[in-house]
Amino acid sequence: MIYGSKETERSAIFDVAKLMAAAARTAPKACGIDNIETLILDGEDKDALAAEMRKIAEETGVEHFARDAGNVDHSEYIILVGVKNIPISLNCGLCGFETCAGAVHAAARCAFNITDLGIAVGSAAAVAADNRIDNRIMWSAGAAAVRLQLFSDRVKVCYGIPLSTTGKSIYFDRQ
């Protein structure tokens, strides 16, 4: 059997996306609290995310939502990495509140959770880079995913990482 480049590259991207999800899951987290969720989208689900990004661009006038949606359109997959807001009960004050209870009452984001998300996203993007899969971390895609409620209701912050294999990265030289 002969496998063409398009077919093998799509398969490779999906394999790497799964490895990225595993890297995000196993990334170090404050106090060992497992607060990371991941999703991989393609097809109609990826199209719906791009459409929501365009909708946000129209509503807000922030044009890079539309630009990034174009990148999502031309990507084979997008992996979403979100974080559940789970205060770790240190009463550290990094969120701006004296106690975790005060932060929960005010619906504030735990600074450690946000840090955990950054580490998880970095770990996931490193896997893509190590496997030579073009990618770009997009907060705009994450914002659309949260707005679409693709994750559990505890995920309020997310990033998207679209993935592509083309002769030249589609994520650079963007207008």
Image (spheres, rainbow, N blue to C red):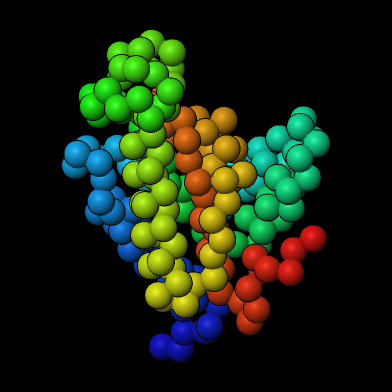
Front-most of 83 and 116?
116
Horizontal arrangement in the rendering, residue 17 relative to residue 70 (left or right): left
Name the spot of residue 107 as percent of width and height, x first: 43, 17
State the image coordinates of residue 161 (x, y, percent, origin top left). Answer: 51, 55
Residue 13 placement: quadrant:
bottom left
* Residue 23: percent from left, percent from top: 31, 58
Seen at 37% across and 52% down, the residue is 119
Residue located 30% across and 19% down the image: 100
Determine whether 148 is above or below 23 in the image.
Answer: above
**Is 170 situated above or below 132?**
above
Residue drawn at x 47%, y 77% as measured from the top left: 132
- Name which quarter of the figure residue 103 lies in: top left
Q: Is residue 73 left or right of residue 126?
A: right
- Side of 130 where 168 appears, left or right: right
Residue 141 versus residue 171 in the image, above or below: above
The residue lying furthest to the bottom in this view is 2
- Res. 54 visible in picture: yes
